[in-house]
Image (cartoon, rainbow, N blue to C red):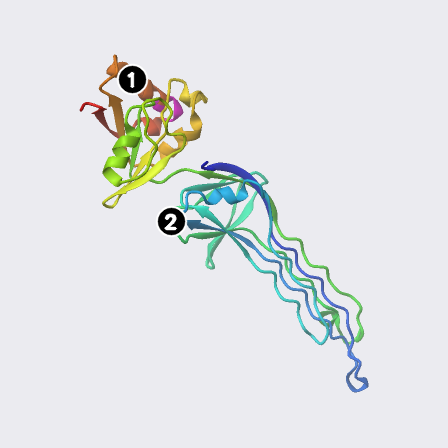
Amino acid sequence: MLIDDITIKIKAGDGGRGAVAFNKNKMSLGPVGGDGGNGGSVYFEGVSDLSALAQFRYKKDIKAKDGANGKRQFNDGPDGDDLVLKVPVGTVIHNFDGSASLTINPEQSRRIETGKIEEIIKIGQRISVARGGRGGKGNFKFRSSTNTSPRQFQFGAPGESFNIRLELKLIADIGLIGLPNAGKSSLLNELTKAKSKVASYPFTTLEPNLGVYYELILADIPGLIEGASAGKGLGVKFLRHVERTKILFHLISAESENPEKDYGIIKKELEHYSKELAEKTEYVFLSKSD
């Protein structure tokens, strides 16, 4: 089963606590407590695997490593490891908890308000959505001319935490649309050697399938029905996958008693879902004409 919409909680690592320690050598008394390590940050990275969101199906609380506490002899605690979560290309990241950090590269950072944060649009693209907490200072950092034996230290700062919705919208050059059992899967299989399930009954395809024809990516969108834009049948769950396609191939079965009505049903659902979707370049084909 393709997981294409899931909500998870991500938590960056907390910073480690600064150490309180003193040199035991009588010739050089003084504070020697090191700083705590920084907590690990959480990243999303784009991959080609469309099933990558399945990793979150049973594990929805995700946490990066905490920074280690500071140590004696000026030794800082190691930083917590960053956590890189692989998500499919086409994933839209929504944040439910206010603003979040987004870093596309070291030179570019900004705060993103509630709603859509960012889209993963290519393999290897990496964004940071939760920053690790800074490590606390050890007592060595609190020394002064008036306080040569400080016992002050800092606790590490907490890492950022957000509830994140991951929504997959397939990226394809051509989307194959039409009523159930219109022959979309058969066409995809013939053109691309994909292995979509084919049968003589409606709703054979229950999740989107992709195939490659030369350099074009084709997406077989599961059969839509009247009322799909309102959630009926396979509904809005699959209409969103049509949004990212550049061109639509609208298949109408030549076996239909009323092809014009079949065309109108799908066209109406596209219009109800979004104006942009209804205005996409569209080619209409009669299928099953052999």
Q: Which mark is residue 99?
A: none
- Identified by mark 2, the residue type is Lys
Badge 2 marks a residue whose secondary structure is loop
Q: Is 65 left, or right, of 107 in this rendering?
A: right
Q: Which label belongs to residue 262?
A: 1
Q: Quick one: label 2 or label 1, which is nearer the N terminus?
A: 2
At which x and y percent is residue 137?
A: 70, 65
Q: In the displayed structure, would residue 142 be above or below residue 13?
A: below
> Which three-letter amino acid code belongs to the residue tagged 1?
Asp
Farthest residue, direction left: 290
Q: Quadrant of the C terminus?
A: top left
Q: Residue at x 46, y 46 (%)?
A: 87
The one nearer the camera, 53 or 152, is: 53
Magenta residues, start to end: 270-274
| Residue 195 at x, y percent in the picture | 32, 38
Task: Classify 11 as above or below 263.
Answer: below
Q: Which residue is mark 2?
A: 122
- The 10 Å Cα crowd at callout 1, few under 14, some 14 to 19, many 20 or more, is some
Residue at the bottom extreme? 27
**Residue drawn at x 58%, y 54% as measured from the top left:** 131
Determine the image quadrant of residue 249: top left
Q: Main secondary structure of the magenta part?
A: helix
Q: Residue at x 32, y 21 (%)?
A: 266
Provide the secondary structure element on which disc 1 rests: helix
Give percent across and percent down for residue 243: 36, 33
